[in-house]
């Protein structure tokens, strides 16, 4: 089927489309927060850079960066067609990320970025440990037993393993 718009108009329309709530990655991080009983965050707070999660009281902005759109070196996925267009697009996204990091830091915010691939089930324990260490080092959570959030705590690790396996609990025997 032929496009009803010319190339210029189609480009204009596509540029006006902005994604919001990258469901799979944000929900994966949301599940980590819930499983580790981390509270105090807000999602999609309207501020410079549009972080995915913020901890307002502690001025922490968390971004979940898609590996393709933000140019993850580990995943390194560039389409085989229109290579120069995609390289330019991703390069500009990286520049914008750096600009927002700088703006937020200059205004007293702490910026934390997580790659999309770090939220895959095989990486959840390592990513959870990284998040916990970051939050502890920035005073958001403590190492106290009340939080059950230390990287070595069995309860938190078990919760993450449950998410990794995505298995329903076994049926109760009657």
Image: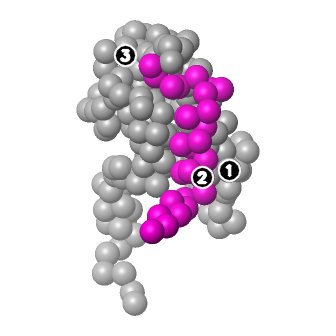
Q: Is residue 160 left or right of residue 11?
A: right
Q: Which residue is mark 2?
A: 164
SS state under label 3: loop
The answer to whether residue 76 is above or below residue 100 is below
The alpha-carbon separation of the residues under discs 1 and 2 comes to 7 Å
Q: Quadrant of the C terminus?
A: bottom left
Assign a secondary structure to mark 2.
helix
Q: What x and y, as percent, mark residue 50?
A: 35, 34
Q: Is residue 59 left or right of residue 114?
A: left
Q: Residues within 10 Å of mark 1 (few under 14, many from 20)?
A: few
Colouring of the image = one colour
Find the magenta span and give its range: 146-174
x, y percentage for residue 132?
55, 25
Q: Which residue is mark 3?
A: 59
Could you tell whether 69 is left or right of 79 in the image?
left
Q: Which residue is mark 1?
A: 122
- Residue 118 visible to the viewer: no
Q: Residues within 10 Å of mark 2 (few under 14, many from 20)?
A: some
Query: Quick check: marks 1 and 2 in contact, CB under 8 Å?
Result: yes
Say whether residue 154 is magenta: yes
Sequence order check, earlier mark of 2 and 3:
3
The structure residue drawn at horizontal position 44% and vertical position 36%, both measured from the top left corner, is 33
């Amino acid at each position: 089927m032929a496009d009803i718009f010319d190339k210029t108009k189609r480009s204009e329309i596509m540029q006006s489309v902005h994604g919001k709530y990258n469901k799979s990655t944000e929900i994966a991080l949301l599940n980590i927060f819930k499983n580790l009983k981390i509270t105090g965050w807000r999602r999609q707070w309207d501020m410079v850079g549009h972080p995915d999660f913020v901890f307002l009281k502690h001025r922490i902005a968390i971004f979940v960066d898609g590996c393709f759109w933000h140019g993850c070196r580990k995943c390194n996925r560039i389409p085989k067609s229109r290579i120069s267009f995609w390289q330019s697009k991703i390069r500009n996204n990286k520049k914008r990320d750096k600009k927002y990091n700088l703006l937020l830091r200059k205004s007293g915010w702490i910026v934390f970025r997580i790659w999309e691939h770090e939220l895959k089930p095989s990486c959840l324990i390592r990513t959870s440990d990284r998040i916990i260490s970051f939050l502890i080092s920035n005073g958001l959570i403590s190492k106290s037993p009340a939080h059950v959030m230390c990287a070595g705590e069995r309860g938190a690790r078990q919760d993450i393993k449950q998410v990794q396996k995505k298995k329903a609990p076994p049926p109760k025997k009657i």
